């Protein structure tokens, strides 16, 4: 496809994603994505939680790239502080989900249908968790130019700071990367995220650039402790609220996971 047409297709895809409910969208070629820090380093935490549990026949953290995948489309849905319910984990009649995740799933599903029907572009459905072989979503978003990795180990975008959630789909279309960000939002602020953490998850150096051989670590400055953050998740899980579920006698559960580092971040508040 001529260069001009490819660029137009990318513009059309990102516009469609936004029409279907995404707040941000971008594209990165699979070749570029495979060279990102998380995809090269592939080191999983040494404990078992959702996302890092052993799956028979799989090496946790290794992506299962579908044959024929040439580009990745990443979408983001904003989770503003004034809509905390988007992030609440609710279980009851179904296995559990968040309202924000349901929005992301809906955008992906509509975009996939449009790509296949209107553009004859094949899409590859990805599992959600790393343990099942999905791609690293923050690397995808950063490489697509949506934002940068912040000192709180989250993707920071100029529009929403760290307050968005991501989904990625792969396609067989040879699409160009939409851009690499040349900004660092953390340089403007004194890292209030680190003060806000109830578990002191940024207290110690865990990885070094020398150890990994990357100037840009997946966890940026190597101080984010998944173990400590996960301890907070355990506390939040135990602190669930019982909620009524329509048509059901047994109450459901609502869990409000910690977002202190996200909500303390001044980036994206305008
Ligand atoms: S989510 Fe909470 S516990 Fe985890 S790093 Fe952020 S502030 Fe700390």
Image (tube, rainbow, N blue to C red):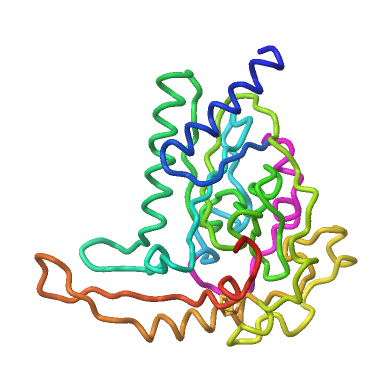
Residue 232 screen position, x and y as percent: 52, 83
Of all residues, the one furthest to the top in this rendering is 2
Q: Residue at x 11, y 69 (%)?
A: 248
Q: Residue at x 70, y 51 (%)?
A: 39
Q: Describe residue 159's horizontal placement relative to residue 180 as left or right.
A: left
Residue at the outermost front position: 270
Among the 4 quarters of the image, the one containing residue 177: top right
Q: Quadrant of the N terminus?
A: top right
Q: Image quadrant for the C terminus?
A: bottom right
View quadrant of ligand 1: bottom right
Q: Position of residue 98 (x, y in %)?
A: 37, 62
Report how many numbered discs are placed on residues in the image: 0
Q: Residue furthest right?
A: 210
Residue name at image x 69 percent, y 16 percent? 4
Expressed as whole percent of the image width and height from the top left, the position of residue 72 reads 60, 37
Along the viewing direction, whichever of 168 and 190 lies nearer the viewer: 190
Identify the image quadrant of residue 191.
bottom right
Q: Is residue 254 above or below residue 108?
A: below
Rendering quarter of residue 229: bottom right
In the displayed structure, does residue 68 sit left or right of residue 40? left
Check residue 170 for magenta coloring.
no
Residue shown at the point (37%, 76%) measured from the top left: 255
226 vs 254, nearest the viewer: 254
Q: Where residue 224 appears, x then y in whole percent?
A: 69, 74
34 displayed left or right of 91: right
Magenta stretch bounds: 29-50
Decide whether residue 47 is among the magenta residues. Answer: yes
Judge whether 266 appears above or below 1 on screen: below
């Amino acid at each position: 496809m001529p260069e001009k047409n490819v660029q137009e297709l990318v513009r059309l895809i990102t516009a469609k994603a936004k029409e279907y409910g995404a707040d941000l969208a971008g594209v990165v070629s699979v070749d570029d994505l495979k060279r990102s820090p998380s995809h090269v380093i592939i080191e999983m935490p040494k404990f078992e939680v959702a996302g890092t549990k052993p799956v028979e026949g799989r090496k946790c953290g290794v992506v299962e790239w579908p044959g024929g995948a040439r580009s990745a489309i990443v979408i983001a849905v904003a989770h503003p502080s004034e809509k905390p319910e988007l992030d609440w984990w609710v279980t009851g009649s179904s296995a559990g989900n968040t309202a924000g995740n349901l929005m992301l799933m809906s955008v992906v599903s509509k975009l996939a249908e449009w790509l296949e029907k209107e553009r004859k572009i094949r899409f590859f459905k990805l599992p959600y968790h790393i343990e099942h072989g999905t791609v690293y979503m923050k690397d995808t978003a950063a490489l697509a130019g949506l934002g940068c990795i912040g000192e709180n180990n989250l993707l920071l975008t100029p529009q929403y700071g760290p307050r968005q959630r991501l989904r990625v789909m792969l396609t067989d279309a040879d699409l160009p990367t939409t851009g690499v960000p040349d900004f660092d939002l953390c340089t403007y602020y004194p890292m209030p995220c680190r003060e806000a953490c109830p578990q002191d998850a940024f207290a110690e150096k865990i990885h070094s650039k020398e150890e990994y051989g990357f100037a840009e670590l997946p966890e940026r400055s190597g101080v984010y402790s998944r173990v400590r953050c996960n301890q907070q998740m355990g506390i939040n899980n135990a602190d669930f609220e019982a909620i009524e579920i329509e048509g059901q006698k047994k109450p459901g559960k609502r869990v409000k996971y910690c977002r202190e580092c996200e909500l303390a971040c001044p980036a994206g508040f305008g």
